[in-house]
Amino acid sequence: MTLGGGASGRPFTPPSTDDVALVLHTSGSTGRPKRVPLSHANLSISAGNIARHYALGPDDVAMCVMPLFHVHGLVASTLATLGSGGTVVVPAKFNPLSFWRVARDHGMTWYSAVPTLHQLLLARAADPGSRRPAGAEKLRFIRSCSAALPPRVMHALETAFGAPVLEAYGMTEAAHQMASNPLPPADRKPGSVGRGAAVQIGIMDPAGTLAPQGHHGEVVIKGPNVITGYENNPAANAVSFVNGWFRTGDRGYLDPDGYLHLVARIKELINRGGEKISPREIDEVLLAHPAVAEAVCFGVPHGTWGEEVEAAVVLREGANATEDELIAYCRERFADYKRPKHIHVTKAIPRTATGKVQRGVVARTYTPSAS
């Protein structure tokens, strides 16, 4: 079919669902970024999945605080809301000081963000136990995605803002959402990214065989929102697709209820003398320390063990804790091989433009010496 081409007079052929709508880059968190061609079908199916999963409708007002060059803000906050007839509010930039005023002025019903932005809002929240901020009255739910949400932060958000927090799991190659915790009254599980949201999720062993429930392995996905290949990258395609499944590069497991629990990026697992250590496990223990606001664990080269465990932390405002105190805290909670041997107390942890921590960058930033 052709349509009139306007002033030029040239015929216009509408795109098909399989045509590429846009090309994005992966974050490159464990290697060189790859080009991801997302079709019109990938985007529209993903946006529809998100709208149905969260029961979005014409009365919903989403605050888009994620950048629109990233699938999180583009697909979840924007396309899913517009596709379901709702309203999208896009501030010029994220500002925790004016966030709730804008939410009140526009009647915000939900927003989605990375944990970093949630924590910035929490840092400026009223004292625990006081009423939620003006602007949160219509809030149906809070969504968190694109990085791991510590359970402590999830509970603090729900207490401060009076709405359920739903952690989700997404990536560029799936046009964003793959799994999410459900709306109440269904269970939302702290530390889990929920069940597959109209996307098949499996756990695969190194031989390419799907593992039974409860077994750890690589998370693989399948669905019409998933790309069929990277652009001009046959080498990446050869290793990323196995028997119709896309390999995410994440290690995790499915619990008896079908909820997915992520352990680590496979390339970020620390191999200390043959022992595989999940950095996220160390992060969560450090975050439970009352003085710690942010924590990132990473591996550094070691002459004997291959890799050694270290971490970087940001302290809460007004709190004090020395490296020795934090190491002693970890000594009580970890076997020796898991315990960080150095903990760098710093004012800020480097992140990407979307708020994602890249452990390799953090390791290089602090350039710890191998012993």
Image (tube, rainbow, N blue to C red):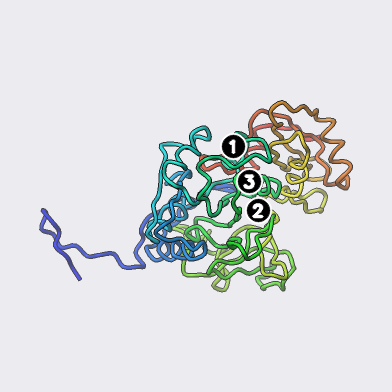
Q: Quadrant of the N terminus?
A: bottom left
**201 or 58, which is in the foreground?**
58
Inspect the image, locate mark 3, and give the three-letter code of the amino acid beneath it: Leu
Q: Quadrant of the C terminus?
A: top right
Q: Which mark is residue 55?
A: none
Q: Are marks 2 and 1 in contact (CB under 8 Å)?
A: no
| Residue found 10% across the figure and 53% down from its top | 7
Discs 2/3, front: 3
Location of mark 1 (residue) = 120
**207 or 220, which is in the foreground?**
220
**35 or 98, which is in the foreground?**
98
Inspect the image, locate mark 1, and give the three-letter code of the amino acid beneath it: Leu
Location of mark 2 (residue) = 265
> Along the polypeptide, which appears first: circle 2 or circle 1?
1
From this view, report whether residue 347 is shown above or below residue 11. Answer: above
Q: Is residue 232 left or right of residue 153?
A: left
Q: Is residue 73 left or right of residue 183?
A: left
Q: Is residue 64 left or right of residue 193?
A: left
Q: Tell me the SS state at disc 1.
A: helix
Location of mark 3 (residue) = 157
- Count neighbours of disc 3 (C-alpha within 10 A) and say few if under 14, some if 14 to 19, many if 20 or more: many
Disc 2/disc 3 C-alpha distance (Å): 26 Å
- How far across and down, in percent of the image, does residue 204 sit? 66, 68
- How far across and down, in percent of the image, does residue 170 sit? 55, 57
Inspect the image, locate mark 2, and give the three-letter code of the amino acid beneath it: Arg
Disc 2/disc 1 C-alpha distance (Å): 25 Å
- Count neighbours of disc 1 (C-alpha within 10 A) and say few if under 14, some if 14 to 19, many if 20 or more: few
> Along the polypeptide, which appears first: circle 3 or circle 1?
1
**In which quarter of the view is residue 262 placed?**
bottom right
